[in-house]
Image: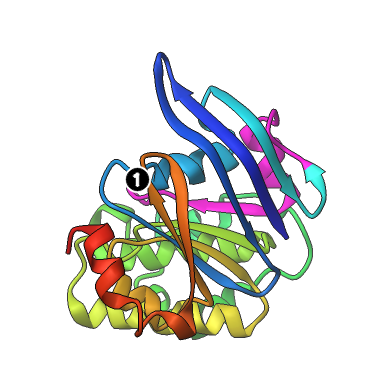
């Protein structure tokens, strides 16, 4: 579904990604693991066209997107949930859900979203400013699911959340995978990621240095902990 080859990215004169290579197959959950500053979030932003200078190849279902604008990338069926969640504070939960356009058939209805996220049904009329961090994260993901996007880029979805909310987010990701969505997940909490992902790419200094299938994770945990500085 997604094939990234030789991806370089810059912020002004700062060269952040150095020839990144990885792929995501349809229906997978794939994680990008690495220390802070390794280039994980920049990778997601580069895919979305949010980094001004990129070189290399980003193919989504065979179509080259490395030079595409963010609106074009979104309309091709890629949804991005940033670390800050991007909730519109002055809009209600329902208004936030309805704001993005439908980009493809097959998105979830509001009723399906309420079934998957009961908290959002209860808070339907609440403004974004009144939501907890966990509810904001649920809303940010749910908003993408309604659009029909089939590839979700999730940047640190468990950051700063209580363990019980982290568990709910994990169950939600497992459910959307079951429904046929594909997820590229940036996550510091690799124990959380290990319960969901099919494969893990380890990034150091803007390069992929390893790929670990999930079934090998237990045997390679010591190696991974050294790489991540845990």
Most foreground residue, 22 or 220: 220
Q: Above or below — where is 23 with respect to 162?
A: above
Rendering quarter of residue 131? bottom left
- Is residue 86 visible in the rendered image? The answer is no
Task: Tell how many labels.
Answer: 1
Rendering quarter of residue 177? bottom right
Q: Residue furthest right?
A: 62
The percent position of residue 171, horizontal first and vertical second, equals 42, 85
Please report the bounds of the magenta region as a residue range. 64-86
Circle 1 residue:
90
Please give the name of the residue rendered at 67% of the width and 59% of the height, measured from the top-left corner.
Answer: 149
Left or right? Give the position of 193 relative to 95: left
Please give the name of the residue rendered at 79% of the width and 55% of the height, measured from the top-left corner.
Answer: 61
The percent position of residue 67, horizontal first and vertical second, equals 69, 28
Left or right? Give the position of 63 relative to 54: right
At label 1, counting other C-alpha atoms closer than 10 Å, the crowd grade (few under 14, some 14-19, many 20 or more) is few
Q: Above or below — where is 38 with respect to 177?
A: above
Please give the name of the residue rendered at 62% of the width and 68% of the height, measured from the top-left corner.
Answer: 182
The percent position of residue 41, horizontal first and vertical second, equals 40, 45
Q: Is residue 19 magenta?
A: no
Quadrant of the rendering where the C terminus is positioned = bottom left
Most foreground residue, 9 or 210: 210
Left or right? Give the position of 160 relative to 56: left
Left or right? Give the position of 36 relative to 214: left
Most foreground residue, 165 or 94: 165
Rendering quarter of residue 189? bottom left
Please give the name of the residue rendered at 41% of the width and 47% of the height, measured from the top-left corner.
Answer: 40
Colour mode of the rendering: rainbow
Q: Residue furthest top?
A: 13
The percent position of residue 22, horizontal first and vertical second, equals 59, 54
Quadrant of the rendering where the N terminus is positioned = bottom right
- Is residue 37 visible in the rendered image? The answer is yes
């Amino acid at each position: 579904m997604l094939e990234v080859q030789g991806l370089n990215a810059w912020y002004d004169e700062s060269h952040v990604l150095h020839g990144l290579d990885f792929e995501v197959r349809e229906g997978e959950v794939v994680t990008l693991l690495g220390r802070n500053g390794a280039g994980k979030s920049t990778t997601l932003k580069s895919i979305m066209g949010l980094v001004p200078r990129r070189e290399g190849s980003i193919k989504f279902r065979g179509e080259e997107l490395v030079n595409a604008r963010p609106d074009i990338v979104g309309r091709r069926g890629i949804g991005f949930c940033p670390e800050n969640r991007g909730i519109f504070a002055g809009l209600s939960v329902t208004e936030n859900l309805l704001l993005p356009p439908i980009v493809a058939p097959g998105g979830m209805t509001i009723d399906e979203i309420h079934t998957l996220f009961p908290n959002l049904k209860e808070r339907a009329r609440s403004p974004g400013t009144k939501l907890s961090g966990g509810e904001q994260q649920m809303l940010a993901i749910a908003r993408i699911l309604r659009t029909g996007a089939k590839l979700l880029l999730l940047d640190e979805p468990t950051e700063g959340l209580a363990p019980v909310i982290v568990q709910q987010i994990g169950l939600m990701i497992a459910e959307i995978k079951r429904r046929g969505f594909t997820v590229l997940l940036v996550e510091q909490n690799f124990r959380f990621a290990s319960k969901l992902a099919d494969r893990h790419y380890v990034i150091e200094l803007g390069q992929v240095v390893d790929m670990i299938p999930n079934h090998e994770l237990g045997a390679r945990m010591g190696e991974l902990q050294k790489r991540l500085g845990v």
